Amino acid sequence: MKEFSKEYKEFNEAYLPIIHIDKSLEKYKGKVIFKEQLDEANKTLKRVGLPKPKDKK
């Protein structure tokens, strides 16, 4: 239990959310569900590009 508490504290200090992914979602892995939206997003990314990452200080 001490190890879990230590890990949880480290995650909490890093401001990372602790989530549990539902195993029933595995059936969607590798499938495109919203094809039209994905195509539109890819077209926009090709035109505009991704934002440049900010420097971590």
Image: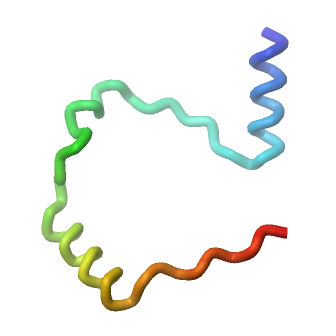
Residue located at (84% from left, 12% from top)? 2
* Coordinates of residue 47 in the picture (x, y in percent): 32, 90
Q: Is 40 located above or below residue 47 in the figure?
A: above
Residue located at (14% from left, 69% from top)? 36
Judge from the rendering whether residue 32 lies leftward or rightward of residue 50; answer left or right: left
Which image quadrant: the C terminus? bottom right
* Coordinates of residue 3 in the picture (x, y in percent): 80, 15
Q: Residue furthest left?
A: 36
Judge from the rendering whether residue 43 lies leftward or rightward of residue 11; answer left or right: left
Q: Residue furthest bottom?
A: 47
Q: How many marks?
A: 0
Residue located at (75% from left, 18% from top)? 4
Q: Is 10 located above or below residue 44 in the figure?
A: above
Residue located at (35% from left, 81% from top)? 45
User: Residue 30 appears in which quarter of the rendering?
Assistant: top left
Q: Residue furthest top?
A: 1
Q: Is 40 located above or below residue 34 in the figure?
A: below
Which residue is at the front of the view, 2 or 57? 57
Which image quadrant: the N terminus? top right
Image color mode: rainbow
* Coordinates of residue 33 in the picture (x, y in percent): 17, 53
* Coordinates of residue 21 in the picture (x, y in percent): 44, 32
